[in-house]
Image (tube, coloured by chain):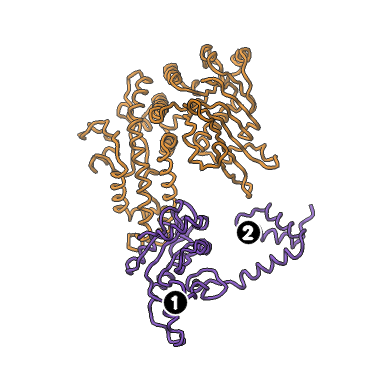
Chain colours: A orange, B purple
Amino acid sequence: MTFLTHLSLTHFRNYAHLDLDFTHRLTLLQGDNAQGKTNLLEAVYLLATSKPVHAQTEREVVDWQAQEEPIPYCRVAAQVRAGEGERPLELEVIFTPRSDGLNFTKQVKVNGVGKRSMDLIGLLRAVLFLPEDIRLVDGGPGERRRYLDIALCQIDPAYCRSLSEYQKVLAQRNSLLKALREQGVQAASPAVDAQLDFWDEKLVQHGAIALAKRQNFVAELDVLARQRHADLSGGRETLYVEYLPSFNYGPLDEGEYRRWRAGNRLGEDGMSGDAGLAAFTVTPEAVAQRFTRRLGERRRRELAAGATLYGPHRDDLRLLANGRDLRAYGSRGQQRSAALALKLAEVQAMTASTGSAPLLLLDDVMSELDANRRSTLLAALEGVEQAILTTTDWDDFTPEFRAAAQCLHVRAGEVFPASEAAQADGASHGGESPRG
Amino acid sequence: MQPLAEPVSRLIDAFAQLPGIGPKTASRLAYFLLRSDESIALNLAKALEELKANTLFCSICFNIADRDPCPVCDDAQRNHALICVVEEPLDVQAIERTGEYAGVYHVLHGAISPVEGVGPDELKIAELLQRIQAGGSAAPPDVDPAHAADWTLLHPSIQEILLATNPNLEGEATAMYISRLVKPLGIRVTRLARGLPMGGDLEYADEVTLGRALTGRSEM
Ligand SMILES: [Zn+2]
């Protein structure tokens, strides 16, 4: 198990300096909006994933006040207890300005020793729940790929390495395809192949590993998310999670694959197989073979596009409830349930494959949920070793829950212990939208 | 605020154009020279002047040298049938330090990197092919007949191309590209043995590791 025992921030967003001990399994942070509750969770998340939440630029994480320091910098550090009697882990991410004054250099340290960002990931595993998680369902494919990447990177270092190599190869291959298009190259030739073949080979090598790991992870998520979703929908709906690749490496023939991609359900509309078939598992070798063939067949098309058209960077997840694509046809309620089911499935998958539950970070999510979804989420908290929750309103949580938690009050980038009196005080006028 | 004296700001601007030097470091260097003994500044000026005036690229291997051909290309003791292909002149220094290599070099001046706009045409790859094709031909008529034997020693037909580009993506791409061009010519193509840290730079490899990679090179 891992337990976050201490967090230390310097010039991180609105925190000039913070030193905070975590003493309980549950920590509840209460405060008005824009006081720093979310920033605190984001700091922890940065240590878990080495990336800021969403696709913010790293510059945004640095506090503007730091600019007035002689040497402006931003530091996020944590102490983590890992396993019984093991040496505590010291995790650290430091941003210092480059000489151009605009960009920052990111430094990662583990136990005081400089490491690659990649080596930080997985030491403190975390799953972050946000009110805007619904974007997982109604947002673009990039949101869903990001969800898969962050979950898988924390579980599987080999995935993280393949993905990182893949991205380097992809950037090179895209630049080459673009340059060839600008030179007016339209078709394959020995001279073109001499330049492209190496990048094809590397794209397939790293891409096939990433694809197979994603496909197999989604097959696992599919089962877990369906169970959690059944709890949330009271068994009225059946959720399927399907990985949508950019080329066919699965068991379907080309005709059926095309119809499945277009939204035809397997086992229906005269198609063979059953709906569960979409959640198959594959080996990297099998994917590599089909990937190589696809690149060979579509050389002309990629030259015309001046970009790489196939591979994990073009893929998506499809979420179906009772056979309907939730992105296009789901109600807000259905979308919210599916997003929550996916997140809970991520927690379970992470627990199953690493042997310990991740740290849960819940950013003001209770207020968005109805009673049924709330109780499902609270039930998930029972099984974890540590959770940090934020709220604007103490009354979002029962007195029993609060009594079991470390209760803290956040105001203007400072964190105070919340006495019972303060909690009562907070309950009377702390929330933006009082509810009773 | 009083503007900087023109010679000072000119020097600061000149320093700031160097890689890895920002405006702050540039000012610090300029003020250091301003305050320190005059001989330091004059030495630097002289070294800079001679850097360009007294160096050139060897017309055979494209290494930086003080004469053409360079001392390596002109050394009859070395094996001129074995060409080690490297990315940068500094890589030649690294390999020479191991004392394990007796062949000659070819400096590409970079590696294939489409992201940076570097393709095969930006590197000395065509020159390498010309060099291979010219190997083993008879001495041209302007060579003194008394030195014809030496000339033949220095221009034998090429037996082996040892690809010593960096063990990273761009270095591998370059090695693969050259190998595809050279192999059909019936010439042995080898690559530095694994054991060099992947993603690394030849220039920073320690001598023992690099020496081992040289002797244990493998067929491509
Ligand atoms: Zn030379």
Earlier-in-chain disc, 2 versus 1: 2
Q: Can you say whether A30 is above or below A171 in the image? A: above
In-front residue for pair B114/A90: A90
In-front residue for pair B81/A275: B81
Residue A394 in percent (x, y) is at 56, 16
Residue B75 in percent (x, y) is at 49, 74
Q: Residues within 10 Å of mark 1 (few under 14, many from 20)?
A: many
Snapshot quadrant of residue B156: bottom left
Dot 2 beta carbon under 8 Å from ligand 1: no
- Spatial separation of the CA atoms under disc 2 and disc 1: 40 Å
Give, as a three-letter code, the residue at label 2: Gln
- At a point 42% along the width and 34% down the height, the residue shown is A155
**Helix, strand or loop at disc 2?**
loop
- Per the image, the residue denoted by label 1 is B154
Badge nearest the viewer, 2 or 1: 1
Give, as a three-letter code, the residue at label 1: Leu
Horizontally, is A266 left or right of B50 in the view?
Answer: left
Q: Which mark is residue A182?
A: none
- At a point 64% along the width and 26% down the height, the residue shown is A414
User: How many dots with numbers?
Assistant: 2
Pointers 2 and 1 in contact (CB under 8 A)? no
Mark 2 falls within which chain?
Answer: B
Mark 1 falls within which chain?
Answer: B
Residue A151 in percent (x, y) is at 43, 34
Q: Residues within 10 Å of mark 2 (few under 14, many from 20)?
A: few
Q: Which mark is residue B17?
A: 2
**Helix, strand or loop at disc 1?**
helix
Q: Are marks 2 and 1 on the same chain?
A: yes
Dot 1 beta carbon under 8 Å from ligand 1: no
Task: Mark yes or no: residue A302 visible.
Answer: yes
- At a point 47% along the width and 22% down the height, the residue shown is A385
